[in-house]
Amino acid sequence: MNISKIVKEDVLRILGETNKKVSLEAARSRIKIPDSILSRIIKRLEQENIIKTENGFIRLTTKGRDEAKDIVKKHLFLENYFKKRRSEIKAHQIAHLLEHYVSEEVINDIKKLSTFKDEGIPLTKFKLHKEGTITDITFSNSALFERIISMGIFLGEKLMVTNEIHHGVIVKIRNKKFALDKELAKEIKVVEYEKP
């Protein structure tokens, strides 16, 4: 994942949530990266006419408001989905991480998941060669959760268990295969994929 894209989305989300100008200092305190990187990205956003800076404050332009609206909407959708399964704080943290990785297609798949009565079974109990959809990832370890997400294993993704190995399973997601040990696999909840 491109750090510039993540920081840009964070700046837009912060400004979009408040819908008013924010001090550069407040933005720096919420986006924990070196000042030189943040300054460079803010300068680029200003050159792209997405934000305006004035007297130590930043605000969205009309173009920036449109982009921020989409990011805030994605964040709130993810946060609300996870509030049903986690604490508010944890749901916010998960949404903040996922908003940078998930595509519109995955968001649409997650919307479909919201209608399922079944919350899924652990991946370790899922049938071989059946297509499934990830309904939840229950890791309490944030670093492990982030690692799994960065691999492309996240909510709404379709997968297939292609093989069982001694201490885990091999899954295919899109055109990639992953070997997951049983401890990881049991934290990923799946329902059988139903074709429309």
Image: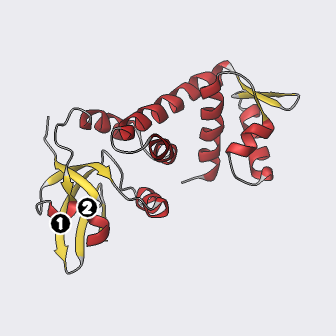
* 60 sits to left or right of 167: right
Mark 2 and mark 1 in contact? Answer it, CB < 8 Å.
yes
Query: Who's the residue at 62% across and 40% down the image?
Result: 10
How crowded pointer 2 is (Cα within 10 Å; few <14, some 14-19, many 20+) is rated as: some
Q: Position of residue 30 (x, y in %)?
A: 68, 43
Is 124 placed above or below 94 here?
below
Closer to us: 177 or 118: 118
Q: Amino acid at mark 1?
A: Thr
Disc 2: which residue: 172
* Residue 182 quadrant: bottom left
Q: Is residue 87 above or below residue 55?
A: below
Q: Is residue 88 visible?
A: yes
Side (left or right) of 186 relative to 67 = left
Query: In this rendering, would 125 be left or right of 16?
Result: left
In this picture the colour scheme is secondary structure
Q: Position of residue 134 (x, y in %)?
A: 27, 50
- The kind of residue tagged 2 is Lys
On the picture, is 10 further left or further right than 135?
right
Residue that label 1 marks: 162
**Secondary structure of residue under mark 1:** strand
| Screen quadrant of the N terminus | bottom right
At x 33%, y 43%, the residue is: 85
Question: Which residue appears at 44% of the width and 37% of the height?
Answer: 79
Q: Earlier in the sequence, mark 2 or mark 1?
A: 1
Is 195 rendered above or below residue 67? Answer: below
Circle 1 Cα neighbour tier, 10 Å, few/some/many (<14 / 14–19 / ≥20): some
Q: Is residue 41 in sight in this rendering?
A: no
Residue 5: image location, x then y, percent: 60, 45
